[in-house]
Image (tube, coloured by chain):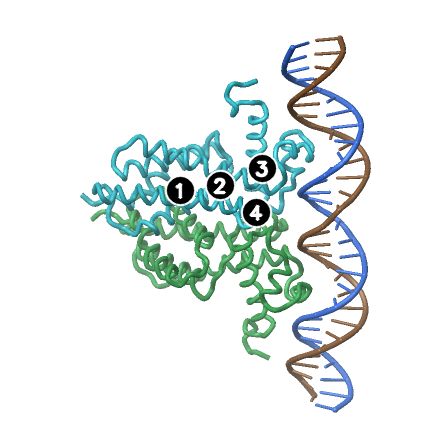
Chain colours: A green, B cyan, C blue, D brown
Amino acid sequence: MARNPDESRFNQQRERVLQAAAHCFNHKGYSGTSLKDVANMLGLTDPALYYYVRNKEELVYLCYVRAADVGREAMEQAVAEGGTGLEQARRYLRYHIESMVGDRGPIAIMSEIPSLTAEHRDEVLELSRRHSKAFEAILERGIADGSIADCDVRMTGNAIMGSINWIPKWFHGDKAMAGSIVAEFPAVLTRGLAQAT
Amino acid sequence: MARNPDESRFNQQRERVLQAAAHCFNHKGYSGTSLKDVANMLGLTDPALYYYVRNKEELVYLCYVRAADVGREAMEQAVAEGGTGLEQARRYLRYHIESMVGDRGPIAIMSEIPSLTAEHRDEVLELSRRHSKAFEAILERGIADGSIADCDVRMTGNAIMGSINWIPKWFHGDKAMAGSIVAEFPAVLTRGLAQAT
DNA sequence: GAATTATTTTAATCTAGATTAAAATTTTTG
DNA sequence: CAAAAATTTTAATCTAGATTAAAATAATTC
């Protein structure tokens, strides 16, 4: 038995299921992906998935929690490393984007939140809200420390988060493209934030 | 009979169907909205919708074409009015956003493109691509005329378009919010573009 | 290597919701 | 107003795909 429960065969396989599902959802759309599609991608038959998730709703839910985790981890690491608000913002964006287009991807676009059960929906929305708040907090710290020009943090946050969230819509694994995104996005998205000096 | 075919009772009613569908898709998710939901919103029963669209796939398709139209109109008007590239970019964003959060809304998020028929999918993707190209062209004109700082137009375009496309995800008709978006977004999204003078 | 546990399969339901058909109603027109 | 056209309804199918049950296989344990 693996010492770390996250590394157990079961959890590893479940992680593969989630990545396959995210891939299918992003490529074929939610309504276009059957459990059979996801299962076949892993060389399994559809009922096998029920060994890892209770039903399709839970599969979607777990994909979304996973997407939120990736964002949260990037945020926590970026904040932990300190620096000015602007530096933290840039770093967060780089970490998050690196994960999304790198080995943590593909990340599911959260387009079917409304179809989740009330409990799951509330939880995912809460994670999402918390993430937005954390980013707004970075912006506010940047304004306070003078690295970021005064702005409407709510709208600025919405704008930047929208860009991030939309990436999986047009990025489909192309390596060269991944490089461009990582190289350009953090700069592009924060260029407008800097306080003129 | 109306002289302008767009104003015929049929077309007006169809437009209402599309708006209702967009509202439902954005609020309940694609898989969560049945034709019954859309029909009931208009005080109709589900089979009545088949008088306006061939099937659900076409309903989605038409919602997406409509969304693309709104963007194209904003783009054309903004470009037609001339000015520097930066001015055109700002104007386009203002027009597009005003339409989205105003009386042309709600606009459907294009999350189910992959479920469209091959013909419809290709057409929508082509519209989408053309729109992106048009925006990149504005950026290039801005770089040429010196109003916009040199940048990776492809990635910059992707970033800004992502912000726009994501708006229907979190904006749900709140009037005050609509005001903030129109007031802030065009500025926020173009702040990073300006050539330092 | 026998017993236990974990994983996957085949085969069988079951159902929501899309779609169709035919009839009823409403609107328009001459 | 009567006929024709337009719009909507009620009632009836029809099906993909989610889900469940039971059995089969593979991996682990002692």
Q: Identify which residue, A152 or B149, lies in the foreground.
A: B149
Assign a secondary structure to mark 3: helix
Tell me where residue B129 appears, x and y as whole percent.
41, 46
Quarter the N terminus of chain A occupies: bottom right
Q: Earlier in the sequence, mark 3 or mark 4?
A: 3
Closer to us: mark 1 or mark 2?
1
User: What percent of the width, then of the height, locates residue A95?
Assistant: 39, 61
**Quadrant of the rendered image containing residue B70:** top left
Identify the residue under disc 1.
Answer: B131
Marked residue chain, label 3: B
Q: Which residue is mark 3?
A: B21
Question: SS of the residue at dot 2?
Answer: helix
Amino acid bearing label 4: Thr
Q: Earlier in the sequence, mark 1 or mark 2?
A: 1
Q: Front-most of B171 and A168? A: A168
In the image, farthest residue toward the left? B197
Tell me the chain of label 2: B
Determine the CA span between mark 3 and mark 1.
Answer: 23 Å
In the rendering, which numbered label is found on residue B168?
2
Query: The residue under label 1 is which amino acid type?
Result: His
Label 2 Cα crowd, 10 Å radius (few <14 / some 14-19 / many 20+): many
Kind of residue at disc 2: Pro
Is C24 in front, or is A107? C24
Amino acid at pointer 3: Ala
Q: Of circles 1 and 4, which is in front?
A: 4
Q: Nearer the viewer, residue B34 or B177?
A: B34
Total labels: the figure holds 4
Report the side of B48 relative to B171 (left or right): right
Kindly identify the residue that appears in the image at 64 percent across and 61 percent down: A36
Can you identify the residue that label 4 sits on?
Answer: B117
Q: Is residue B128 left or right of residue B26?
A: left
